[in-house]
Image (tube, helix red, strand yellow):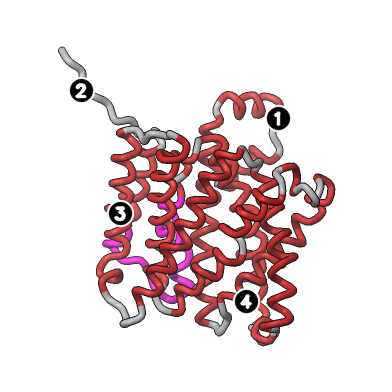
Amino acid sequence: MSTSLSTFAVPTVPSRVALRDRPEVCGLALGLLAAGIWGSYLAMARAGVSAGLHATDVAAIRYGVAGLIMLPWLLRRGVMDMAGMGMKKGATLTLLVGPLFVITGVSGYSFAPLAHGAVIQPAALTLGSLGLAFLVLGDRPTIARVVGVAIILAGLAVIAGPGLMTGAALTPIGDLLFAAAGLMWAVFTVLSRRWGVPPVAGTAVVSVLSAIVYVPCYISVIGADRLLAAPLPMLAAQILVQGVLSGVVAVIAFSKTVQLLGAGRAAVFPALVPAVAILIGMPITGEIPNSLQLAGLALVSTGLLVAIGVIALRKPRSH
């Protein structure tokens, strides 16, 4: 992954030509990058809640840092008209994937474990994006995409295992919050495609608007006591994962994936998040993947390759 990304970052002239000729390659790489970051985001959110942080603290970290990073860009492009997209569209996108999105999703971990959030939220995002892409954009799913998503869902069920069927009495509340967060991002995905929102512009507008509106309210009403009391390594990790990677890099990467592949095909990548959460994130919380979960990872990976057309479904030749 790192080799591919570095090739894209400092390309030679032939690399640019190849990249333009094969947007699917760039879309695949960026989609995988976004999925990897989101898996780390879910795990770090769970670790933060376990360490005493609240969902509101995580939202403040994410948009405070992302807003500072993207503010210079937005100032150059025009704050008043939201980089050309207008205040109405900018506010709508911010409502969908701004602080409310983070607070909704992270709050779920107060009621349900990581295994629930790592499966339910990306599954809701994937299914919601596919359905909305068909209803709103007329993006009719191909047979390969339907088969691929079915394989992915089977893999997710294997990964979650009996964990989704057990839990405390309040666990369903967490599950509903995870599903709501996934659907919020699904609407963002489809609207970004329909409105033709450039990836960097969308990220800048959401980050800066969120920082301007939310961070002052957070400081004045809630206060930063929990953040100041958090261990420095934990706080640094949250700033990196939540603010820089998830708040900026992943949003740009996924928005570009939607632009290159379309909302329907891009909707498949969030289904990889549970696999990443298990391979990278779950060891952070002390949960090591078992053989059944590894089998689920293989199913999810196969489903992704089928859904985006890397593994072709061929009809048998007639003789």
Dominant SS of magenta comes to helix
- Mark-to-mark CA distance, 4 and 3: 33 Å
Which residue matches tag 2? 316
Depth check, front residue: 259 or 284: 259
Q: Say whether disc 3 or disc 1 marks the residue closer to the N-terminus.
A: 1
Q: In the rendered structure, which amino acid carries the disc numbered 2?
A: Pro
Q: Say whether disc 2 or disc 4 marks the residue closer to the N-terminus.
A: 4
Q: Say whether disc 2 or disc 3 marks the residue closer to the N-terminus.
A: 3
Q: Say whether disc 4 or disc 3 marks the residue closer to the N-terminus.
A: 4
Disc 3 vs disc 1: which is toward the camera?
Answer: 3
Depth check, front residue: 132 or 264: 132
Q: Going 54% across and 46% down the picture, which residue do you hit?
A: 1
Residue 164 in the image: state x and y as whole percent.
Answer: 30, 69
Depth check, front residue: 8 or 171: 171
Residue 57 circle label: 4
Disc 1 vs disc 4: which is toward the camera?
Answer: 4
